[in-house]
Image (cartoon, coloured by chain):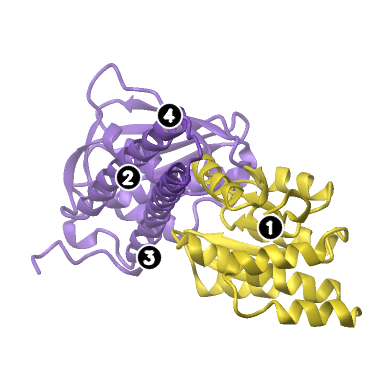
Amino acid sequence: MDNGKDLFGYDSLAFFGKVNASISHELKNVMAIISETAGLLGDLSDMASNGTPIKPDMLKSCTGSIMEEIQRGFLTIRQMNRFAHSVDTPLESVNLMDVLDLAITLSGYLSFSGKAHLTPCKDRTPTASTCPFLLQAIIYQALVYTFKSTGPDTAIRISLQAQGDAAWRIIFSGFNANAFQKFPDATTRAMAESIGVVFHFDSTINRLALEVPLTIESTTTEQVAPGV
Amino acid sequence: MEPESTINILLVDDEVKFLAAVSDRLTIKGFNVTTATNGEKAIEAANKGGFDVAVVDLQMPGTDGAQVLKILKERHKFIEIIMLTGHATVDSAVECTKLGAFKYLEKPYDFDKLIEVLKDAYHLRMQKKFENNAKRMDAIQALSMGQSPLGILKALAKLDDGNK
């Protein structure tokens, strides 16, 4: 294996597995709806064969539902593919909006997830040279803590602010401060330290900020995720 | 199935389309189905009484399936509960069994399998309900073989008629 591609440890693997399990859960739900709706179409066909009049609207509703679920399945598989490729390169220049978008989408597959609204960054493209996999793991964990603590009715707001030429701040707001009493856990903290991400939590205004350095050149490839 | 011998099913899942499709299929087969899209609504519906079997999704926002299972088993003596999940684990299966789930089905499942499990669950409910009624117990035992699952369900429901 090439140098730099075998640096993610057990906790990263555990995160990878956890997210994949939630994606497979989503796909199973999609398949279950398609299976039951196709079965219903079969039941209706049998009834029609036996002389029971069937309303065309019911058939249209079934086929429409199947088409929608197929699209939902395609979309889920696309996100699964994005997530799978996020480990391809340990360090690269990434658009933080893309990383945030994927982390938000993935956390949305959890049964306890609420809503997360991402405000686009209009001033300039928010790029950073970082480890996209670890950064999305940290963002994902922040979302999980919020949703777990405040429930499915939560609507988190996420925005980005430039911190001069040195860093970007990812700001989470719209949640209860209690959500972050135990955040970050040791694993997430180790991941953050390995890529130079710093947590700023202000309980007076219910705001969490993740400071992402524009580059982690000072952190060598070999140092990414030590012990993580 | 005649209206007077209908089996009352409480179907609980946060996937609305899944709920609608399964509800329609069970209704076509002659069951009387009530749906709930979350745990709170399921408990509220069950409090009105009259359900023979509940089919409950394990992973739901808010009050999850395991909590619904625990509350329904505590409050409703004879109800049997079938758990559904899209993410089966040994731990969750053990937990549900300890809480009194009749069966644990993984999505997507075969519809005929659901009917078979519903038949077994309803059969167990009848045995518990009439355990002190030897005549009816004999009749219930006699129904256990030689018919399709739907046929057995229909016959069991007739035996239960008037005792809901």
How many angstroms separate mark 2 from mark 3 (CA)?
Answer: 24 Å
How many angstroms separate mark 4 from mark 3 (CA)?
Answer: 48 Å
Q: Quadrant of the N terminus of chain A?
A: bottom left
The amino acid marked with disc number 3 is: Ala
For disc 2, the chain is A
For disc 3, the marked residue is A14
Horizontal side, residue A64 vs residue B123: left or right: left
How many angstroms separate mark 4 from mark 1 (CA)?
Answer: 31 Å
Chain B drawn in what color?
yellow
Secondary structure category for the residue under label 4: helix
For disc 1, the marked residue is B54
- Residue A45 vertical position relative to residue B149 in the rendered view, above or below: above
The amino acid marked with disc number 4 is: Pro
Q: Quadrant of the C terminus of chain A?
A: bottom left
Q: Earlier in the sequence, mark 2 or mark 3?
A: 3
For disc 2, the marked residue is A73
Residue that extends furthest to the front in the rendered view of this protein? A51
Viewer-nearest of labels 4 and 3? 4
Chain letter, purple in picture: A
Q: Is residue A118 visible?
A: yes
